[in-house]
Every structure is written in structure tokens, then in C-alpha cells.
Image (cartoon, rainbow, N blue to C red):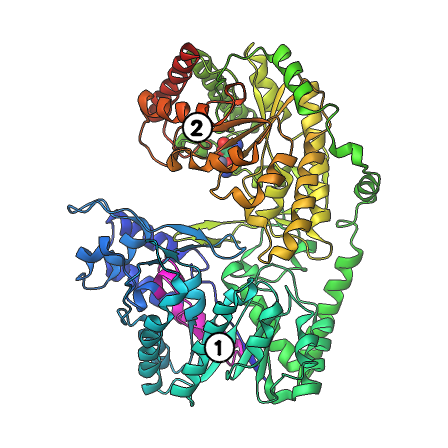
């Protein structure tokens, strides 16, 4: 029996890689310094895994930016616009230009596109393919890192993205071909790599093919068979580990079981049932090793040893100990580094901490599970098993997890709770009377610039350098100035500016029961950007109002309507580590009730417009279409629970910022928000098409100002966009607003851009 880790976090336990990369980008250090940082992280990761007893230690799981971009460089898939940079000695400026774009030394080249890695919050750089795409081994990273580990006395298992997944997650940059047709051209580059690795006596290679968790066409399935057939034929002595994760093999199982691979990895956290399917299949080849992904690589909970051992024993009974490995369900990239760094009881109480395991602890779990499953009766192993049992028992019974008040409220929910009093037309009329807004009403998405000063107040408060009263005064002043600014330029629906918020999820988590936080629980989101998701460990309860004070204060300053600003239940759920002892749909409804109470309080305090942001609804979609319906049903219901406790006259807004509405437009309509604001400016209103085609009935604010860029849009540009929108959407339903919140912008550009935006709305009114 072997232990197998699919990949390890690489940002550094103190985010060393983030810091070093950002210094390099600023020109503050030379590449040597960044290179050394990377080398140290790799070394630490390898030595740690060896020390903890991992048999199959990954290499090439490190990356300076992204593992998919690494693969593009490895096979020489470099778009033409970067070719001038190809002579760069370390390839690093080329690499970062592809990742981030380059605007210096006479270059002005845009970055490659970035998108989410399956259903995670990790973003990869999307490969770009041309019809005549050529592939040649361009970067030797895989070989270099293998050698580097070898020099430390560690024979690693190189990890590669499999050729089929690599093609499928990319994009055709011209018409007239499907990227899967490039396989014949891509395979020789992989063969060349394998040749070089095999010359260095590599024993195992891990091919990641998470596309096997998707619905594949017959042609794509054949591509998988073809590819691994060829590899086995050319390199019979290399042991191929084929991995899939994030969901079942599903109906790709027949294809996969007939592949000539040495080991097949199963994500048994996301799909426990597939083990029985495989063990009972007549197709099962008894020479194939199964890598059992029983330790969750996507979440932070301690493993349940008793149940994992049962699973392992079942597989051992069929295949024998030799053919069973114990593994993480996927790469540990999606977990924070080390739980032992968390010593602040206020963020993470000891009771909750004992239920958790981060990457390092998960590796220990994997090796302990092997000890238990192979009959190690040493005192140390028995003690670990006992401690694990105890922690999990305490968790099941904890009063801090189970709150009868929350459970009873959930059980009393009825259909009426997720339904507004009247239909949209009636509400529209009543809101019109109450709010008396002009045509083309103007508003913003919520946040105003989070300047360094604003952030410094928060950190001073945290360090007790200023009192809560002093902090509140500063925030009040900033809020008041922002209200005055919005009045001055003539915006119609104002916002308070969100100056008191660190992050749109963390802020709410900190005010709700059932949430815990970490100080070092960073997870890579993309490049040097990391997030620190809250941990939802128990029933969610709102004890006190969360936003009321600031919204009510802002409303008290003005006679114009101020929009209350909340994060929606689905987004809070998606951007947290979620408890695994009940379905996510139930946790979501608990959060929905907390938001509902807040919405109702805001209404009582005189806020007639309330926005519930749901930027994460789209990314929560399951990988396989068969599960979409169920997900969308509870996601929509949760939003509606949070938004339906108000009078007809109260106007509910929602906001979303992503590019794919086609698949979910019917569900977006079912949210029944009175107004939705979306991101559209960069796509020239193309994203409105889904709404137009669907005849979306409620009001829409298609963004006319790209807030991702410091550029100030001109009145002419915005007018063109609005004219286009007015030809697509009934003018009575149109709002005028930016694409998203302004927190990453500076004040001068914000002032100019919003002034132009209001002026443009006035021009539109004059035209009408
Ligand atoms: N209200 C939030 C803001 O303006 C919305 C952020 C988002 O959509 N991601 O910052
Ligand atoms: Zn947004």
C-alpha cells in the first residue's frame, strides 16, 4: 500500500511566493530572488512530505503563476502576440507577459484570458489555439523540477495536465475547427517529454484529466482512449497514474476502465459511490491500482478515520493491499497550508480548531490511514485513531454547531416565504409612485474607493491603535463625504460606500454565529492573489443587525433614496469553507434567513431600496448538467427567502458580474429581483443578448463603465452603449450604472467617471 499526494500548496506558508512575485513585478528585485523563493518552497514541500512518509511525492505541482500556463509553455503553445519575447533568457518575462500582459520596454501586449478551474475558486490561464497550431517542447520545467528533487535525494512523481484536459479547457481563437482535433499534433510533444523523463528513470507520472468529471462526447472519450493507448505502447515501463477529481467518472467509467494505465485515481469525497461501481464492474482489471482519494483536498475538515478505513478495507478485499493507495481527493492546492499557524482563539476557537485539518495535517492523515489500514498496532497509531474518533464525536454533539432555534425556523419555512406579495408589474407601479425616479435612473454597485487610508483605519483598530469610537467617526466622515459627492453629481439612488467592510463575505461572516476565521488560511485564487475564506462550522444565526447602522446613518444624511447593501446567501456559501455534515442547500437556507432578517430591518429603518449581491451563483453550477436543476432550485429559493419579506414598495436589486448568462437566464429571472445590475461594458452589451432573447421581464442595469481599468470612460462611449441597450431593452426597464463596485479604484477617476455617467443619463433622458 502506498500513500499518494496529488499536489501541494505552493504559495508558501507565509505567502512568500506572493510577496516575491509582486516585488519582481515592481522591479524591486531581480529574477534570482524570485527564483530562490520558488526553489525554497519546493524544497520545503518535498522534504516535509518525505518526513511525513508520503510514498508518491508530486513534482511540477509548483508554479510561478498557474499550472495550465506552465503546460502551455511546456508544449510551446504561445500566442503570436508574445513571440517578440520568446528569446527572453529565463522565459520568465514571456511567462508573466502571457499571465498579466506587458506594458513597458516598448511592449504593449494584453494578457491571456483567465477563467475558473472547474468548480473551484482557482483561476487558470486559458490556452489559445489556432487552426494550424503547432506544439514543440519549449520549457523544460518538468524535467528541471524532477532533477531538482532528485538532487535532494527524492524521486518524485511528475504531475502533468493530461493532453485531453489541456485541449478541452482551452479556446479556439479562430473559426473552422474543434480544439480536440489538435490531439494528433499535441501528442508528439507529450511523447518527447516522456522520452526525456524516461531517460532520467522516472518511475511514475501523474496525468491529471479532470475533464473526466464532465459530460464528454463520444469523440472526446475516444481521444482519451487513443492518447493513453499510445503512451502505454511507446513507454511500457513508465507507470501512468490517471487522475480525475471534483466529481465521478460517471459515464466515462467504461472508457477509463479499459485504459492501459497502471493506476486510476478516484475522488471518493465528491463521489463515494463510484468505488462500488468499480469494484463490482466486470471490466475491472485486477492489475490496475486504485488510488483512493479519501482525504478531502477541497475542504478543511478533519478526516473521519473509521469511515475511511472501512472504504479502504472494502477495496483491499477485492484488489489486495499492494494495489491500493491512500490519497488526497485532489491537489491540496485548494487548502490552506498549516493549521498549527492558527493560534488566535478569537478567530478560531480551540473547539472548532480540533475539527480541522489543513494541507500539512491532511498529509499526516493520509500516512496515518495507511498505518491503520495495514494493521499497524503501535501505541502511536492507536492513539491517533482514538484522538480522531474523539474529535469527530465532539463535533457531532457540539452545542456550538446545533442550534434548535435555527433548525425550527428552517422547518417552518413555507412557499409563501419565498414569494413577494405581488407580481412584478404591480410592484413596479408601486415603487414608481414611492421612489419617483426619472427615466434612466442612475446608481452604483455599492463600494466606493477603499483607499490606503480607509484600510489603515481598519488595521489600526485591529491593533488597538485607535478606539472603536474613533474608527466609527472616521468611517462616518468618509460615508458622509461620499453621500455628498453622490448628491452633488446628481446620482438618483445613492449608496453608503461600504467603507466599514474588509470583504463582502468576511464582513457578514464575522457578524453571524456559526462562522470561524483564520489568520493564515490563505488559498491561491490566481497568480499572486490569495483569499482567506471563512469557515462555516455550525448553524447560521443572525443575532444582531449587521449593516443597519451604516445604511441607516447614510439614509439619515439625505432625502434621496439610499440603497442598503447585502451579500446574498449563495455567494456567502460559495466563498466560504462549508460544513460537510449537512447539505450545502440547507446551510444556504440558514444564511438566507439571516439575510432576510437584515433586509426586513433595513426596510423598517426606512431604506426603500435594498441590493442583495449574488456574484457567485454561476460558479456554483455543478460540473455535470444532470445536477444543475437541483442546484438552481435551492439557489433561487435561498435568494428568494432572503428577499421576499418586504412590502411591494421596497425595491430589491441584485448584482452579478460574470460573463455567462445563457445557461442560467431562466433561473436569474426566477430570482424575481426588481432590478438586476450586470457587467457588460467590455463586451459591448453582448451579454445583454441572453436577457433579450429570454424577454427578461424585470428592470436591468447593464454596466457602462469598466471598473477593472483606471481609464475614465467618455460620455460618448457610454452614450453609445446606452443607445445600444435602449434598442434591446424597453427604456422603462433600463438603469444606468458601472459594471461593479468601485473599491479598487481611486477617487479622481471615480469622480470623473461617475460625473460622465450621470451626464450621459441626462442626455439619454433628453433624447427620449
Ligand atoms: N456591492 C459589492 C461592491 O460594490 C459588489 C462586489 C461584487 O460584485 N463582487 O463592492
Ligand atoms: Zn460585481
- Which residue is identified by label 2? 738
Can residue 331 be seen here? no
Quadrant of image for the N terminus: bottom right
Task: Choose top left, top right, bottom left or bottom right for residue 420.
Answer: top right
Q: Residue at x 63, y 83 (%)?
A: 283
Q: Nearer the viewer, mark 1 or mark 2?
A: 1
Q: Estimate the spatial distance between the alpha carbons at disc 1 and disc 2, rounded to whole Å.
A: 48 Å
- Which residue is identified by label 1? 225
Q: Secondary structure at mark 2?
A: loop
Looking at the image, residue 733 lies above or below residue 206 = above
In the rendering, which numbered label is found on residue 551?
none
Magenta segment boundaries in residue numbering: 42-71
Can residue 498 be seen here? yes
Between residue 503 and residue 642, name the one nearer to us: 642
Task: Choose top left, top right, bottom left or bottom right for residue 256.
Answer: bottom right
Residue 59 in magenta? yes
Locate residue 57 relative to residue 604 in the image: left or right: left
Categorize mark 2 by other alpha carbons within 10 Å: few (<14), some (14-19), many (20+): many
Looking at the image, residue 195 lies above or below residue 435 = below
Amino acid at each position: 500500500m502506498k500513500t499518494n499526494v496529488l499536489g501541494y500548496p505552493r504559495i508558501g506558508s507565509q505567502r512568500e511566493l506572493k510577496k516575491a512575485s509582486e516585488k519582481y513585478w515592481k522591479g524591486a528585485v531581480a529574477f534570482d530572488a524570485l527564483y530562490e523563493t520558488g526553489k525554497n518552497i519546493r524544497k520545503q514541500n518535498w522534504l516535509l512530505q518525505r518526513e511525513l512518509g508520503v510514498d508518491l511525492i508530486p513534482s511540477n505541482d509548483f508554479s510561478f503563476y498557474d499550472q495550465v500556463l506552465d503546460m502551455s509553455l511546456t508544449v510551446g503553445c504561445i500566442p503570436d502576440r508574445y513571440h517578440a519575447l520568446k528569446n527572453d533568457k529565463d522565459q520568465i518575462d514571456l511567462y508573466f507577459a502571457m499571465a498579466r500582459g506587458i506594458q513597458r520596454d516598448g511592449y504593449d501586449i494584453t494578457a491571456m484570458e483567465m477563467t475558473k478551474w472547474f468548480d473551484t475558486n482557482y483561476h487558470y490561464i486559458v490556452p489559445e489555439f489556432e487552426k494550424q497550431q503547432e506544439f514543440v517542447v519549449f520549457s523544460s520545467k518538468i524535467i528541471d523540477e524532477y532533477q531538482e528533487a532528485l538532487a535532494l535525494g527524492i524521486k518524485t512523481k511528475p504531475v502533468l495536465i493530461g493532453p485531453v484536459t489541456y485541449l478541452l479547457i482551452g479556446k479556439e481563437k479562430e473559426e473552422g475547427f474543434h480544439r480536440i482535433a489538435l490531439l494528433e499534433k499535441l501528442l508528439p510533444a507529450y511523447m518527447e517529454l516522456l522520452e526525456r523523463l524516461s531517460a532520467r528513470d522516472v518511475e511514475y507520472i501523474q496525468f491529471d484529466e479532470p475533464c473526466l468529471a464532465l459530460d464528454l462526447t463520444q469523440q472526446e472519450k475516444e481521444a482519451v482512449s487513443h492518447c493513453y493507448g499510445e503512451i502505454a505502447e511507446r513507454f511500457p515501463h513508465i507507470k501512468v497514474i490517471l487522475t480525475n477529481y471534483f466529481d465521478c467518472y460517471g459515464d466515462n467509467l467504461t472508457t477509463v476502465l479499459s485504459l492501459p494505465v497502471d493506476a486510476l485515481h478516484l475522488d471518493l469525497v465528491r463521489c463515494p459511490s463510484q468505488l462500488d461501481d468499480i469494484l463490482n464492474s466486470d471490466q475491472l482489471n485486477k492489475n490496475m491500482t486504485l488510488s483512493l482519494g479519501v482525504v478531502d483536498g477541497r475542504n478543511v475538515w478533519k478526516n473521519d478515520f473509521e469511515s475511511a478505513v472501512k472504504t479502504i478495507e472494502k477495496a483491499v478485499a477485492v484488489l489486495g493491499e499492494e494495489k491500493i493507495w491512500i490519497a488526497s481527493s485532489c491537489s491540496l492546492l485548494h487548502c490552506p497550508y498549516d493549521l498549527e499557524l492558527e493560534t488566535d482563539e478569537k478567530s478560531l476557537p480551540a473547539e472548532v480548531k480540533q475539527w480541522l485539518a489543513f494541507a500539512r495535517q491532511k498529509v499526516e492523515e493520509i500516512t496515518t490511514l495507511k498505518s491503520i489500514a495495514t494493521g499497524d498496532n503501535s501505541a502511536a497509531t492507536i492513539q491517533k485513531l482514538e484522538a480522531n474518533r474523539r474529535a469527530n464525536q465532539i463535533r457531532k454533539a457540539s452545542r456550538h454547531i446545533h442550534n434548535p432555534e435555527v433548525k425550527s425556523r428552517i422547518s417552518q419555512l413555507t412557499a409563501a416565504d419565498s414569494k413577494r406579495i405581488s407580481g412584478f408589474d404591480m410592484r413596479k407601479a408601486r415603487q414608481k409612485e414611492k421612489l419617483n425616479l426619472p427615466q434612466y435612473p442612475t446608481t452604483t454597485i455599492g463600494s466606493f474607493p477603499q483607499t490606503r487610508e480607509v484600510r489603515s483605519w481598519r488595521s489600526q483598530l485591529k491593533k488597538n491603535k485607535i478606539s472603536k469610537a474613533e474608527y466609527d467617526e472616521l468611517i462616518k466622515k468618509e460615508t458622509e463625504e461620499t453621500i455628498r459627492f453622490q448628491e452633488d453629481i446628481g446620482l438618483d439612488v445613492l449608496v453608503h460606500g461600504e467603507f466599514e467592510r474588509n470583504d463582502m463575505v468576511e464582513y457578514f461572516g464575522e457578524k453571524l454565529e456559526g462562522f470561524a476565521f483564520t489568520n493564515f488560511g490563505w488559498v491561491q485564487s490566481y497568480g499572486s492573489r490569495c483569499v482567506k475564506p471563512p469557515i462555516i462550522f455550525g448553524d447560521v444565526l443572525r443575532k444582531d443587525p449587521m449593516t443597519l447602522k451604516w445604511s441607516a446613518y447614510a439614509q439619515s444624511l439625505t432625502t434621496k433614496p439610499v440603497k442598503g447593501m447585502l451579500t446574498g446567501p449563495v455567494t456567502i456559501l460559495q466563498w466560504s469553507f462549508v460544513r460537510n455534515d449537512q447539505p450545502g442547500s440547507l446551510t444556504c437556507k440558514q444564511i438566507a434567513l439571516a439575510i432576510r432578517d437584515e433586509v426586513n430591518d433595513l426596510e423598517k429603518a426606512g431604506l426603500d431600496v435594498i441590493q442583495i449581491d449574488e456574484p457567485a451563483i454561476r460558479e456554483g453550477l455543478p460540473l455535470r448538467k444532470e445536477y444543475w436543476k437541483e442546484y438552481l432550485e435551492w439557489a433561487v429559493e435561498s435568494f428568494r427567502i432572503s428577499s421576499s419579506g418586504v412590502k411591494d414598495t421596497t425595491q430589491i436589486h441584485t448584482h452579478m458580474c460574470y460573463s455567462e448568462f445563457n445557461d442560467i437566464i431562466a433561473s436569474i429571472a426566477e430570482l424575481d429581483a426588481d432590478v438586476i445590475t450586470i457587467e457588460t461594458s467590455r463586451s459591448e452589451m453582448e451579454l445583454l443578448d441572453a436577457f433579450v432573447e429570454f424577454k427578461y421581464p424585470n428592470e436591468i442595469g447593464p454596466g457602462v463603465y469598466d471598473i477593472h481599468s483606471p481609464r475614465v470612460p467618455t460620455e460618448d462611449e457610454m452614450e453609445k452603449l446606452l443607445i445600444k441597450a435602449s434598442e434591446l431593452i424597453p427604456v422603462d426597464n433600463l438603469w444606468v450604472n458601472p459594471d461593479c463596485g468601485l473599491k479598487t479604484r481611486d477617487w479622481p477617476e471615480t469622480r470623473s467617471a461617475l460625473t460622465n455617467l450621470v451626464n450621459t443619463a441626462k442626455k439619454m433622458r433628453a433624447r427620449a
